[in-house]
Image (cartoon, helix red, strand yellow):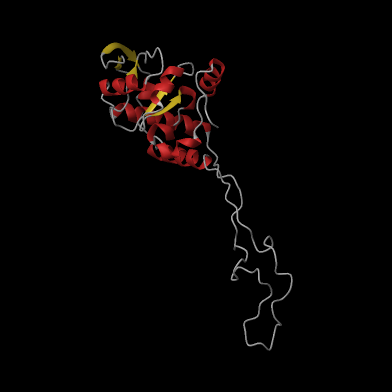
Amino acid sequence: MAKFEVKNSEGKKVAEAELAAEVYGIEPNIHVMHHIVKCQMASWRQGTQSAKGRSEVSGGGQKPWRHKGTGRARQGSIRAAQWRHGGVVFAPKPRSYAKRMNNKEVKLAMRSALSAKLADGELVLVDDYGFEKPSTKAAVAMLKALGLEGKRLTIIVRDEDVNAYLSFRNIPKPFIITADEANTCLLYTSPSPRDRQKYRMPSSACKKKTNNGSASRKS
């Protein structure tokens, strides 16, 4: 596999990395990637929707009028679906939307995503973020030096690099995750700021910040 340049925070080349051909040099399997992304997005659904059916709404203990002789349509309960305040037909109930994913397909999709990113020139390796303290201004300058300013992207940081997380998190378009949180969906569909509440901050970073008392996060 050809070598890939590693840049510093100023956008200058500082080294070269040898990328594994079995990870970054395969032919992307689009079908498997699509399947895994659908499964991962489905597993993130809360599935908390709920409505009451006919047997769960209050009222309707007796027949509203006699069966024959009124000239009106026969009715058995005022809590049937056609009535106001009646139950919902096939009412949705809380359930899991998670789908089964084979481990081999998950790994193949990840390798396909990395290979496609490298082939499309959408992969950037940074030697060290070098944040001595949290600084959004420095993070914006770094993205500008790397030619990534104003773009939707996913930034992968180390668990212990709390300063990098705090520096990038206030920028609207970048989405920050740790290496163990990386997956096919997040590599290709960087969440918008509106959808990011479903993703939790890295547990190790949260624990470290809480212990230091430098920052806190609302759950």
Percent x, y for residue 107? 47, 29
Q: Is residue 202 left or right of residue 145?
A: right
Q: Residue at x 40, y 31 (%)?
A: 187
Q: Quadrant of residue 62?
A: bottom right
Query: Quarter holding the N terminus?
Result: top left
Q: Residue at x 35, y 30 (%)?
A: 153
Towards the viewer: 69 or 36: 69
In the image, residue 171 sits, relative to residue 53, either above or below, namely above
In the image, residue 136 sits, relative to residue 50, either above or below, namely above
How many tags in the picture? 0
Towards the viewer: 3 or 198: 198
Towards the viewer: 133 or 70: 133
Query: Quarter holding the C terminus?
Result: top right
Q: Is residue 84 left or right of residue 176?
A: right
Q: Quadrant of residue 108?
A: top left
Q: Residue at x 66, y 72 (%)?
A: 78
Q: Is residue 28 left or right of residue 180?
A: left
Percent x, y for residue 11? 27, 17
In the image, residue 70 sits, relative to residue 3, either above or below, namely below
Q: Residue at x 49, y 24 (%)?
A: 180
Percent x, y for residue 214? 50, 18
Which residue extends farthest top?
A: 14
Percent x, y for residue 93? 61, 52
Q: Is residue 145 left or right of residue 39?
A: left
Which residue extends farthest right?
A: 61
Q: Quadrant of residue 64?
A: bottom right
